[in-house]
Amino acid sequence: MQNAVVSREEWLEARRALLLKEKEETRQRDKLRAERMALPWVKVDKDYRFDTPSGEKSLSDLFDGRSQLMVYHFMMGPEWKEGCTGCSFLSDHVDGMLPHLNNHDVTWVAVARAPVERIEAYKKRMGWKFPWVSSLNSDFNFDYHVSFTPEDLAKGKVFYNFTEIKSEDAHDELPGMSVFYKNDKGEIFHTYSNYARGGEEALGTLMVLDCAPKGRNETSTMDFVKRHDEYESARNGPSCCH
């Protein structure tokens, strides 16, 4: 692989042309962020409960004294022995963000349907510190359209990423992120969710690779990613597996 080789002057001209497009992308992203913040909210009236290493907690408890909660829907089902590779890749980026998010009145929590004991074992293996709870005994994952029963999948279509997709393109667990706000009265509102590639901007590694000469160098989305403790010995395979 090698691109055209030109003089420094020709390169500068091409780079300036690209810079104009990059600046336009930044302006469009700023507009999109403003529209995201202006989305209407939905009040959460259901009493969701989660299993944690320190006992059962409510959705309100997960805010941990802050007014904003970001829930990462981590793909790790009840019978899975380890977490999804792609979700693990994203989670490698989280711990460094936590002090900044917490200082900005934001709590980050991962939620999966695996039992809390299995979550804790995998979390220890990966060396992560962020909060991670189990929704095994809750409707939370199903209500936010990231988990699907065999009966759901047997219908031929499931609702994911705000539309119906074919069951053959789905799994029992899928990734996403949902965001909540709690006001001074203790009322909770669902403000935003994204799914599939919607959370890609949280993947700083991808943003860096996008500036590298070979880019992401992938044939399918994130097919190069492995769990960080598997790079020397892992077999090639899909980015999300169990």
Image (cartoon, grey):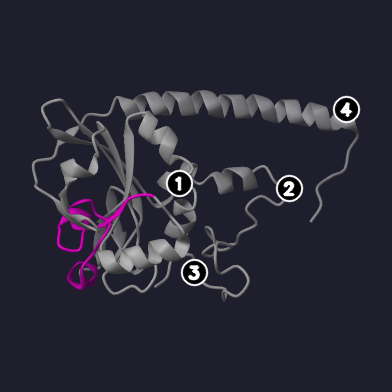
Q: Which residue is mark 4?
A: 9
* Structural distance between the alpha carbons of marks 3 and 1: 25 Å
Residue at (41, 45) in percent of width and height: 198
Q: Which residue is mark 1?
A: 95
Q: Which residues are magenta?
A: 130-154
Residue at (54, 44) in percent of width and height: 204
Residue 172 position, x and y percent, is 29, 67
Q: Residues within 10 Å of mark 3 (few under 14, many from 20)?
A: some
Q: Is residue 237 magenta?
A: no
- Could you tell me the amino acid type at mark 2? Pro
Residue 212 position, x and y percent, is 70, 46
Q: Earlier in the sequence, mark 1 or mark 4?
A: 4
Q: Is residue 150 above or below residue 23?
A: below
- Could you tell me the amino acid type at mark 1? Asp
Residue 213 circle label: 2
* Structural distance between the alpha carbons of marks 2 and 1: 28 Å
Q: Earlier in the sequence, mark 2 or mark 1?
A: 1
